[in-house]
Image (cartoon, helix red, strand yellow):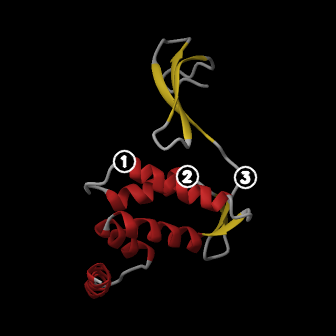
């Protein structure tokens, strides 16, 4: 594993343990060149996924991109990071076990929407505003009204 500080090729594993959701192994490493310590995560990847965008463009699935999108929606919300990580891992697992190597971006968006709906209504509305391309304040108002109505029933 290359050191993020000095670029040295070798590092020694000092500690390994599963993450809270059990979907990855967290490893503390120490660079043999500069002695700096850093953390890496090792995850199971069942298959290589390709995301098919709406313009029929294809790109490799990027878990970090998914995590950034969810993090933006959840920013400054009282949501436990473990629950967010569990949501992201669950979405990735669903995609990998679907049997398809190409996944439409729309399917990923729908899975995120479904997950955020159960996690936090504000994060759900934030993500929906980008995903559904809200153009006016009225779009927010109508969507938030529908979310509030669904929560009351």
- Crowding near the residue tagged with mark 1, few <14, some 14–19, many ≥20 C-alpha atoms within 10 Å: few
Question: Which residue corresponds to the image point at 58% horizontal and 56% vertical from the top-left?
Answer: 92
Q: Is residue 2 left or right of residue 80?
A: right
Q: Nearer the viewer, residue 106 or 119?
A: 119
C-alpha gap between disc 3 and disc 1: 26 Å
**In the rendered image, which residue does mark 3 sit on?**
47
**In the rendered image, which residue does mark 1 sit on?**
81
C-alpha gap between disc 2 and disc 3: 13 Å
Image quadrant in which the N terminus is located: top right
Quick check: 57 above or below 25? below
Secondary structure of residue under mark 1:
helix
- The answer to which quarter of the image holds residue 43 is top right
Secondary structure of residue under mark 3:
loop
User: Residue 5, how many percent across, how many down?
Assistant: 48, 23
Quick check: 138 above or below 33? below
Question: Which residue corresponds to the image point at 49% horizontal and 12% vertical from the top-left?
Answer: 34
Question: Which residue corresponds to the image point at 49% horizontal and 37% vertical from the top-left?
Answer: 19
Q: Is residue 92 left or right of residue 147?
A: right
C-alpha gap between disc 2 and disc 1: 16 Å
Q: Nearer the viewer, residue 39 or 9?
A: 39
Question: Which residue corresponds to the image point at 45% horizontal and 71% vertical from the top-left?
Answer: 113
Q: Are marks 3 and 1 in contact (CB under 8 Å)?
A: no
Mark closer to the observer (2, 1): 1
Count of numbered circles on the image = 3
Quick check: 66 above or below 130? above
**In the rendered image, which residue does mark 2 sit on?**
63
Image quadrant in which the C terminus is located: bottom left
């Amino acid at each position: 594993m290359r050191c993020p500080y000095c670029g040295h090729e070798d590092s020694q594993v000092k500690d390994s343990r599963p993450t809270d959701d059990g979907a990855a192994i967290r490893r503390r490493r120490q660079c043999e060149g500069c002695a700096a310590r850093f953390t890496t995560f090792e995850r199971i990847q069942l298959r290589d996924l390709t995301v098919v965008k709406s313009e029929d463009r294809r790109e490799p699935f990027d878990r970090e991109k998914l995590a950034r999108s969810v993090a933006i929606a959840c920013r400054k919300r009282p949501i436990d990071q473990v629950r967010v990580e569990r949501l992201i891992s669950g979405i990735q697992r669903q995609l990998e076990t679907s049997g398809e190597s190409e996944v439409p971006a729309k399917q990923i968006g729908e899975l995120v929407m479904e997950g955020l709906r159960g996690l936090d209504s504000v994060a759900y509305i934030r993500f929906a505003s980008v995903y559904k391309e809200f153009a006016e304040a009225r779009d927010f108002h109508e969507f938030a009204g529908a979310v509030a109505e669904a929560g009351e029933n």
